[in-house]
Image (tube, rainbow, N blue to C red):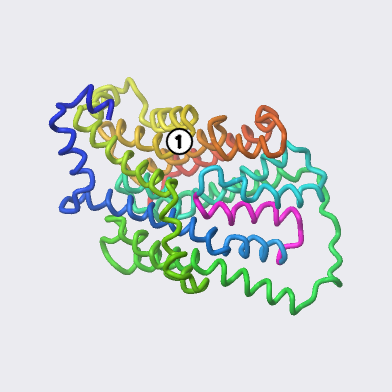
Amino acid sequence: MVLGLLAVDWQDIPIIAYKTVDPSTKNGLLALSVILATFGIMWLSQLYEVTGQMVKLSESASMLVRNPKILLSVLPAIIGLLPVAGGALMSAPIVDAEAEKLKLKPERKVYVNVWFRHVILPIYPLSPMLITVAGLTGTPIFSIVLLQLPIFVVMVAVGFFLGFWKTAAPKVDKADELPSKKSSDLKDFAVAFSPILTTVVVAVLIGVSVRGFSEQGLDVLIATFAGIAALALISRTSPKTLVKPLQSLSIYGVTLAVYGAFLLRNIIEAAGLSKILQPLVSSGNLNVTALLIAIPMFFSFLTGSPSGAIAVGASILAGALTFTPKTSMLLYISAYLGYNIAPTHLCFTFTADYFKTHIGKVYKYMIPSALATFAAALMVYFLPFSI
């Protein structure tokens, strides 16, 4: 809004604000779909907590996986499927209990909790960050996911190596495990996980079977509300409980932030700022790859807001390049890594406070992990293939 007041005719601001979500235009419909999908995802995540299914999901996973190393890797990632600000605190108590079995130091506990909570985001199609970058760049979300699969594998391998290096898992007495109890835990996990699985499967099926829905963001939008219906069904939620999450301001805050990302792009375009870099790139004075890395990484590290950084980066660079799955991937990973290691990252600071350690001690794990991930992203970016 400040940028609009400074760089655009004031009477044009309401027009731009409406055109951002005008369903009669292609870009407006896409923005509206992404915004409503984000609203649905936040509703789903809050509903998981209200119905108690989040507790069932984490408890059944901890009973099924008895190896502390595997559990410490999987459980934060499962909880990471629900995009709650500072949500690493949800997994911190379990991580603390399991990490004690491995005699991990507090700074390594912080690293394991934060790194594995976010490790799933590059390939999770319901991540608001991924939905936003796909919407802003006009790139099919699953094209970005496919490119980021090898990056995800590197992240898991690096996280496991640095998180559990020189630690030995305690022996588990399998005689104490009753087959009937294990079957019950598996059933509880499958039931609790089914709404998330339903959402992902429906999104994939719509994306590959209905032409044009993916480009308009309608696949994730429809799938999200299918997931809400599935969760309401398995938890036998009453109408009162179903709408209870809508009383939380955090749902509207995140939704408004996504609208703000699209509005920022349109304000930048209306002000002509997106065209500033075009002659510099064309003349060879600025390198597109360097800009794709520097702009989103700098803003996400500075603000702890990857969606805002993605909005700024996509808007500024739109006049200098045509986005492809590879450029969208590099934009996303740059913003993601800048955010992941930022001291302004809520999950990072909250977890460090929970484990009573300084975030500076955690950087000896976070920085090598980020560098390895970034190297993998550059390899994918420069390899001569396309999707």
Instruction: Classify the position of the N terminus by image quarter.
Output: top left
Identify the residue at the far bottom of this view.
180
Residue 212 placement (x, y as % from top left) = 26, 61
At x 70% / y 56%, what residue is drawn? 71
At x 32% / y 69%, what residue is drawn? 209
Q: Is 95 on the left or on the right of 195, as rendered?
A: right
Quarter occupied by residue 159: top right
Element at badge 1? loop
Residue under label 1, please give it. Answer: 305
Identify the residue at the far front of this view.
240
Start-end of magenta stretch: 64-83
Q: Say which of 11 and 200 sits in front.
A: 11
Residue 60 placement (x, y as % from top left) = 67, 66
Residue 347 placement (x, y as % from top left) = 58, 40
Question: Which amino acid is tagged 1?
Answer: Ser
At x 14% / y 26%, what residue is drawn? 9
Q: Is 184 on the left or on the right of 328, as rendered?
A: right
Quarter occupied by residue 14: top left
Inspect the magenta stretch and tell me whether residue 78 lies in it: yes
Is 184 placed above or below 224 here? Answer: below
Q: Say which of 380 and 354 sits in front.
A: 354
